Amino acid sequence: MATNAPTKEASIEQIQYAKILEKGMYAGLLLMVITFALYVFGIMKPLIPLDAIPTLWATKSGVYLTTVENQYIPEGHSLKAKVHTQQDVKTQQDAQDKLTEAHGGKADVHHAPQHVLSGWAWFSLLGYADFLNFLPVAILAGVTILCYAVIIPGFLARKDMAMAFMAMAEIAILVLAASGILKVGGH
């Protein structure tokens, strides 16, 4: 007679998940130490000079992003072209708002600043030590997706469709959140 009583032994999927999580965690931590050493010891050049960090960290995030985008991203970098494009669009929007107001209308559209450094833009700056430090953080955050992907075949083989579906849903949610499509909060 089969029961649904909990057991004290870990399932095969739990053991697989834990093994991958452990290896991913150690790999991410090792990479974190290496990238931090490259940054701190000046082996790789940072995008933002170390002496500017305290001042920038004391500002609001929008000011920080605007300053980095305008002052530190080098000319010729693909992100710098995006900064210039967004500034051109903002200038055009501001001119249109002034024209609307001059003709008795009201410019009721608030143009929130868009920053090119949001989302996965850091990936294009991996050649700089301060942005290379983001890579192990992304690995540590992403190892959970790999853990879930590995245990799905076991659930399917046992015909445990509920657990397989939950693992697939978790992967979908994590991937959507990492992609920036699924957003929560006002940031």
Image (tube, grey):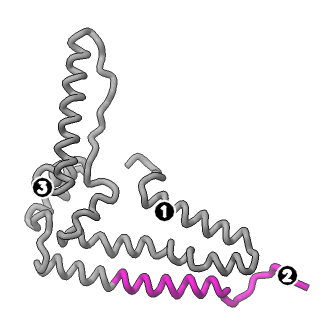
Q: Residue at x 18, y 49 (%)?
A: 81
Which sits in the foreground, 137 or 99?
A: 99
3D distance between C-alphas at marks 3 and 1:
31 Å
Q: Quadrant of the N terminus?
A: bottom right
**First of labels 3, 1 by sequence position:** 3
Dot 2 or dot 3, earlier in sequence: 2
Residue under pointer 1 = 175
Q: Main secondary structure of the magenta part?
A: helix
The residue that disc 2 covers is 3
Which badge, 1 or 2, is on the more N-terminal residue? 2
**Whether residue 44 is situated above or below residue 168 in the rendered picture:** below
How far is disc 1 from disc 2 in space, using C-alphas?
35 Å
Q: Amino acid at mark 2?
A: Thr
Q: Residue at x 28, y 43 (%)?
A: 114
Check disc 3 and report the residue beneath it. Answer: 76
| Mark carried by residue 145 | none
* First to last magenta residue range: 1-29
Q: Nearer the viewer, mark 1 or mark 2?
A: 1
The reply to whether discs 3 and 1 touch (Cβ–Cβ < 8 Å) is no
Q: Nearer the viewer, residue 59 or 95?
A: 95
Horizontally, residue 167 falls left or right of residue 87, namely right
- Tell me the amino acid under the disc marked 3: Gly
Query: Which percent across, then down, holds residue 58?
Result: 18, 56
Q: Which amino acid type is marked by label 1?
A: Val
